[in-house]
Amino acid sequence: MVDYRPLSDQRAVFHEFRSYAFRPDAGVPPYEPDEHDTPRALRGARRGIYESADAADDDPRSVCRHYWLDATVRGETHPIAGLASVATPPEFRRQGYVRELLANSLAEYRERDRRFSVLWPFSYDFYHKYGWETSNRIVTHEFDPEVCSFATAAVDVASTGSFRPVEADAFGELVPVYERHAERYELALDRDEDWWRHRTFAGHDVDPYVYAFERDGRVAGYLVHTIDGDRGDWTMTVSELVAADHEAFLALLSFCHTHDSQVERVRLRLPTDAPFRETVREPDAVETTVTNGPMVRIVDVAEVLSSLSYPTSSEAALTLSVTDPLADWNDGLFELTVADGRGDCELVRESPSTDATVDIALDVAALSELAVGTRSATELARTNRLEATDREPVSTLAELVPKTAVYLGEFF
């Protein structure tokens, strides 16, 4: 039987596994603690699957990293787990080690009362079969900086405010405007100081530039960007743009315009509902692509559905048949009762029989989308991701957990 445990001091092995999995074109650079053990790299808890508990000195077969985070779900903060750096060397692939790693990770999340797991997949289909589902999309707009000249004309930045670079030590100045932004989106992370310093202000290879737009003595918006490519063909890549209001949004676009003598293109990543194409004067000069973002998964169905907030005007009782390929505690028939804005969910039968009375049947991946607000029960039913006895349970579930704006754009 395989053994799941911390990697302890096997940092060189972890470095080797990750290098082969994610940057094979660069070879495996020798592990140098002074170079590779940066504060960013040391965040998270490293875990591995070993062939057995007896072989304490053996190398792992598969590894991963867990981040213990907090995020907003339906207006309240919930503990979540970020799963990253899942890597298996080729000699151990297709032997079930990753499945064991994921199953044991979920069990640890449950013990730690983590309600959701989020990850950035190398393959959506790979993680979908284990119960994760896409949480949100990310829109990328690419354009000549001159496209944003309208913003410069619309906002007189010199008279309304000013721009200045921000260093990591001053991250606290950005927190209020970020928190206003986070209130609009489910799965927005509750960033601690380490996350600001070693994620927002630090990159894998190159640290980004962080600039704030200040108005009336307060930060009204900021953007995080890098300049990539070769001289004469540079691209300004904006990974995060946060504005307190539309005027600040225009000011930040004007900041992008000021780079017209320096860069050939601007690449801007935004939530799907950010009104960029609705605001620019030349939308036909913007190349917009929509891609899948991270994936999300419920850790414990009964715990999550009992902990979510619900509309205070709704009262309902539903039976849910849930299937889960990894977590047996999620595989069965659940009763959900909602009243006064709170829910109570219990597992009443494991692996429900076909003759059991069921209002709604769905898998844990679809339920995860529903819980965070990515898709409504009506949308899931329309695409055969949810089965129901009739329309009434679908309408009831859609009312209890309505669709809402979801955006997690931070890589980890």
Image (cartoon, rainbow, N blue to C red):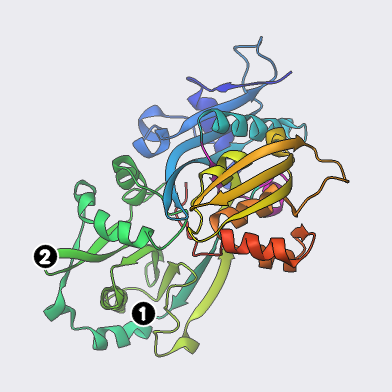
Q: Residue 160's mark? A: none
Q: Residue furthest top?
A: 54
Please tell me which residue is depicted at 77% across the width and 59% down the height of the picture. 388
Q: Which of marks 1 and 2 is nearer the N terminus?
A: 1
Question: Badge 2: how crowded within 10 Å, few (<14), some, or many (20+)?
Answer: few
- Number of numbered discs: 2
Q: Position of residue 179 (x, y in %)?
A: 31, 56
Within the image, what quadrant is residue 298 found in?
top right
Left or right of 313 on screen, residue 153: left
The kind of residue tagged 2 is Gly
Q: Residue 217's mark? A: 2
Res. 120 in view: no
Q: Residue 145's mark? A: 1
Left or right of 138 on screen, residue 235: left
Span of residues in magenta:
114-131
> Is disc 1 placed on a helix, strand or loop?
helix
The kind of residue tagged 1 is Pro
